[in-house]
Amino acid sequence: CNGNNLCILYTRVYDIYCRTSADGGTTWTSAVRVNEVPGEAYGGCRAVNSGTNVYVVWGDDRNDGGDIYFDRSSDGGLTWLAADVRLDLDAIGASISGGPLISCSGNNVCVAWLVSGQTLFRSSSDGGLTWGSITTMAGAYSDRMLVCNNSNVYYVFEDIFQHHISFSHSSDLGATWPVLGNIHDSNYSQEPHIAYGLGRVWLLWNNSWENV
């Protein structure tokens, strides 16, 4: 949202749709399909905004292998790129990518996804017009969250084998990732959440034994 301007993205029968409101939700525009190729989006979509710029990422099966695609709107969701942007760079159909995450800070857009037992990351510093190289992040786990603030990117996830909460931080928009550290070592820690605000990184997680 941006003031009274609202934007909702949702999936329906393997397509991604967008509706917008300019009056705080009293009235809404007709639904607009976001994905260029119909009937191939899977696993839901993830979207963020910075002002009137809206960014969305999703898994897509148009190439019969599972890829990660991105789209952007510069007018609050009214119009979208004519062609979706493929973010994974492996050979078409070579592997199945999924589980995308997205975060933004101003014109910096950060995306992470799962493929072949690892987490890959790619970022843009111009609102998704161009993209940097793909880097590898730590681990490939189901419960993961990503947040960025300026060029700082923060990543938290659950180690599903040890049930620990681990954290990693990149200060160069994901170009490099230091060795990760455990935030909470007790067993049965799961469902991590992360946010940035008031100059701090905030982490929350669930621990069924310790009520954390």
Image (cartoon, rainbow, N blue to C red):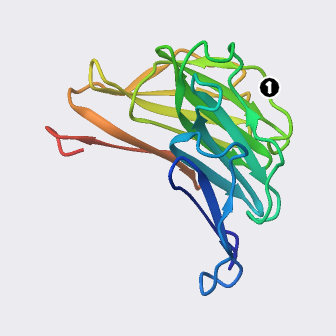
Query: Residue at 69% of width from left, 42% of height from top?
Result: 37
Image vertical order of residue 199 relative to residue 134, above or below: below
Q: Quadrant of the C terminus?
A: top left
Q: Which residue is mark 1?
A: 132
Q: Give SS at disc 1.
A: loop
Q: Is residue 199 visible?
A: no
- The amino acid pointed to by label 1 is Gly
Q: Quadrant of the N terminus?
A: bottom right
Q: Is residue 168 visible?
A: yes
Residue 180, position in %: x, y?
49, 19
Query: Residue at 46% of width from left, 14% of height from top?
Result: 117
In the displayed structure image, the side of residue 176 where residue 116 appears, left or right: left
Quadrant in the picture for residue 84 = top right
Quadrant in the picture for residue 176 = top right
> What count of labels does the image hold?
1
* Category of crowding for the residue at label 1, using alpha-carbon neighbours closer than 10 angstroms: few (below 14), some (14–19), many (at least 20): some
